[in-house]
Image: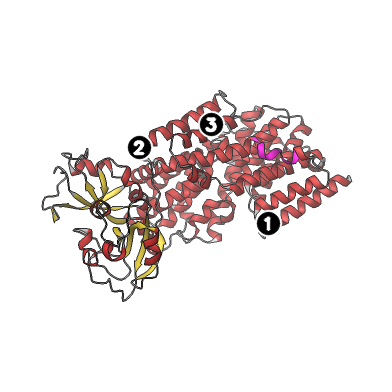
Amino acid sequence: MEPQQIVFLAILATALALFVSGRMRVDVVAMLTLLTLTFTGILDARQALAGFSSEPAIIVAAVFVLSAGLSATGITDRMGAAIGRAAGGSEWRTIAVVMPATAALAAFSHHVMVTAMMLPILMRLAREQKLAASRLLMPMSLAASLGTTLTLFSAPAFLLAGDLLKRAGGEGLDIFAITPIGAALVALGTAYMLLGRWLLPKREGEAQQADYLRLERYYTELLVERDSPWIGRTRGEFEQAFAERLQVVDWLRHGMRRRRQAGDSPLAAGDVLLVRASPDEIASIKDEPGLVLHAVAKYGDKPREAGQAELLGEEQLVQAVVAPHSEFIGRSVSDIDFLRTLGVVVVGLWRREGWLHGELSEMRLEEGDLLVLWGRQPEFETLAAHHGFLMLMPFQGREKPRRRAPLALAIMVATVAAAATELLPPQIAFLAGAVAMVLCRCVPIEQAYQQIDVRIFVMIAGVIPLGIAMEQSGTARLVADLLMAHAAHWPVFVLLLVMFGVAALLTQILSDAATTVLLAPIALAVAQGLELSPTPFVVCTAMGAVASFLTPIGHHGNLLILNPGQYTFGDFLRVGVPLTAAIALATAWMARWLWLGGPLWPALGG
């Protein structure tokens, strides 16, 4: 072993120890590793910084922005709600519908975002259909992870694998090169969860989480304006158009509750609809033609009285909880006159129990009521010290430009098509798509930047030089030679399984990107030693890093469902070990068929 290899192995061992210990952020560890490789002379400056301009880093950053555009325009919400409706009321049908649909979403978006989007939908479905959420959430999370095996850009590991193959003198991987394997894995995972539902825990206790998720629905009032396109159209048409976004609870005309609230009754100018809506819908309602928050229309444009702060200009939404023994308890919103006394307007209300009817301003407040207040920052600074409120919290709602949803979808389709047809280099196609999302105002530039996970970007840029150093120092060839000395006579199928298995174990403590960077050069060297195409060996390694479900910490999406599903470590082990073994066999078999001319149907021989 040469001195440079010894130094590299020492750097690698230190980096692995820091990655596993969690004492430092992964991006910081990656940067320290990069600098150490440069200071020790293993890499020059150009090689050390190659990761920042690499295709994987650029595509990952662009995919975050594209995903943000789909989410901001409501496309992912609509798809998620449609999936929930199609799932029906039975457990088997829910799994059969949710898993393929979730995988398809994750193929073109970030799998953690898809898991977070589907979580409340399945929790609500479980509550309404009296199903155990623990029987639904794990299949959904596994499907979101399996969906990342459908396209090259949905997981950093595959981008890094393609980059390595290209640097080795090959053609790399196009964005649908792994799709046949991914499709087989999604089908396998769905069949496994349908047949092996008995492996899933069935526990009580989901109700508490469901109550918490009801905070996603507030009561608010919508006013039909004089020039509204909804005038003359029926309530049924309104409810159908907004079915996925809000729920009509009551209908008021001239301040009185309408006796006839049938679906065929027409709306009129000045009508007020009491609805239950999410924070995003409340924040976005101003973009709906002919509709406005009733309280804002009623109070916001009135001339200010002497000494009254003006509401117009710097408005924002804030949540306030009515405190125990508050002076507001038992009084209605109109009696308190929030605008005159406190300089804010009540535009929404959440109450833990019971349904509300009638005009929001006539609701008598109770302890624990959560009010959505509309006003300016100076008023909220004063309100924060008021003893009538327990606390003030930011209103977690983002405006969604839903009218730009078709444009956002067209940008995403054009991006994928440009990369798939090689009309543009993949990194340029995705970068152009991200810029188009911002220029077309599908997502605000600030939100686009916020959605980019800088840690992942920096980590990818930092670990790519680690893979280069492994190759350049000869360490990859050294390990491959040791492996070949003991496994030279093993069948190719077994060697592919070995590469998958080692990656599957290592990814439980490292990220899929770091695992691929460390093991892919070894897979490349093994293939070269056998004088075979390196593609199946590298792809099996990346698949092992992405599609192994041995523990809940292997995938961030699993951490989101851990508490809502009341899962234990053993639950993931019991479900994940047989599934991962089946995925390993399917991946190795498909890879051998795709790139080494092996049989598609089971047959003897390696």
Q: Amino acid at mark 2?
A: Arg
Q: Which residue is mark 1?
A: 20
Residue in the picture at 69% in, 30% down? 166
Q: Quadrant of residue 266?
A: top left
Of residue 562 and residue 25, the one placed in the foreground of this image is 25
- Please identify the residue farthest to the front as the structure is shown: 306
Quadrant (top left, top right, bottom left, bottom right) of the C terminus: top right
Disc nearer the start of the sequence (2/1): 1
Of residue 82 and residue 359, the one placed in the foreground of this image is 359
* Residue stretch in magenta: 47-54
Disc nearer the start of the sequence (2/3): 2
Q: Amino acid at mark 3?
A: Ala
Residue at mark 2 to residue at mark 1: CA–CA distance: 45 Å
Quadrant (top left, top right, bottom left, bottom right) of the N terminus: top right
Q: Amino acid at mark 1?
A: Val
**Which is closer to the viewer, label 2 or label 1?**
2
The answer to whether 395 is drawn above or below residue 63 in the figure is below
